[in-house]
Amino acid sequence: MPQFPAEDERFALDSHPDAPPEGERWSTWDGAAHGPGPRPDWVITALGAVDADLGVLKTGKEADVHIVRRWLPGDPSRDVFMAAKRFRSSKHRLFHRDAGYLEGRRVRRSRETRAMARRTEYGKEVIAGQWAFAEFNTLGTLWGAGLPVPYPVQFDGTEILMEFIGSDGVAAPRLAQCRPSPEVLPELFVQLRTVMEQLAELGWAHGDLSAYNVLLDGERLVVIDWPQIVDVIGNPHGMEFLERDARTIAAWFTRRGHAVDADELFADLVAAATSRW
């Protein structure tokens, strides 16, 4: 697995003697895994593009999210903000909640499977890599299926560059930070229920869905934070994760004044998940 410098060195000019005259690093597009096609027009693929880290957007137990600006010097039309999600190494991550989510996932080599199960240092590195790669792959699949998720631009080891949800460098707020009016709540719930049903039809549950990982971009909801996505059928605890997602969302909307029957929502999701059996 590639090794990356510490975050405080990642964009340091004095550690990169070949740094570009503008920005803080050359675009890392070349050599990275790329998101699915057809690629959005705003994605900058030119090797002469440069990146600048504009600071931390969010910190978390498994990863930190930074705002990165990428532009092509001399071409003012090629300038975009992205979210850079950087997963922690095995030495700086919490592994206490990994096991339940990882059940049902497979790796190609038995050595890796044994190391993951025993939580050896090597096993933890494998898990960290799986966590990042799983989110990148998931975003690509869901974006391709038309679900409201950020477009995954590229993946490079433990960093995912993805679509920045917001405008002019100002991030869209989390649903938990908003106070939608009673008139708007029913429409927002319909949007989120549709996402949950589409996921269930694909055989998945978000696994950690709440108002804290749903962004309100104008009148549109965008669901984020996908590394723990759960295979409802392959994971022996899949239905438990599906039910937890349903009850968490139902409780949030009910507290805000739009009553949602959690049992009914869960039943609808189970029906969607088992419709292809």
Image: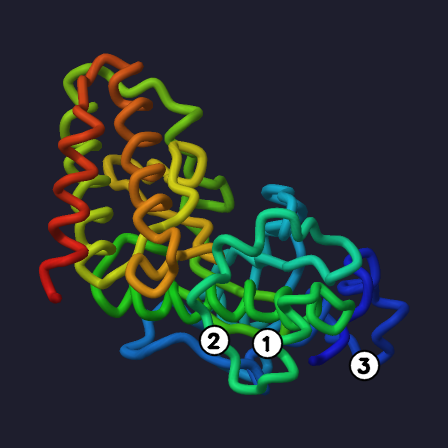
Left or right of 183 on screen, residue 16: right
Q: Amino acid at mark 2?
A: Arg
Q: Amino acid at mark 3?
A: Asp
The picture places residue 91, in percent across and down from the top left corner, at 79, 58
Dot 3 falls on a residue whose secondary structure is loop
In three-dimensional space, the C-alpha distance between marks 2 and 3, rounded to whole angstroms, equals 40 Å
Graded by Cα atoms within 10 Å as few (under 14), some (14 to 19) or many (20 or more), the crowding at tag 1 reads: some
Dot 1 falls on a residue whose secondary structure is helix
Q: Is residue 215 above or below residue 22?
A: above
The picture places residue 82, in percent across and down from the top left corner, at 51, 58
Split into 4 quadrants, where in the image is the C terminus?
A: bottom left
Please give the name of the residue rendered at 57% of the width and 86% of the height, measured from the top-left corner. Answer: 109
Where does label 3 land, which residue?
Answer: 18
Which numbered disc covers residue 113?
1
Q: In the figure, residue 42 lies in which quadrant?
A: bottom left
Left or right of 66 on screen, residue 277: left
Q: Earlier in the sequence, mark 3 or mark 1?
A: 3
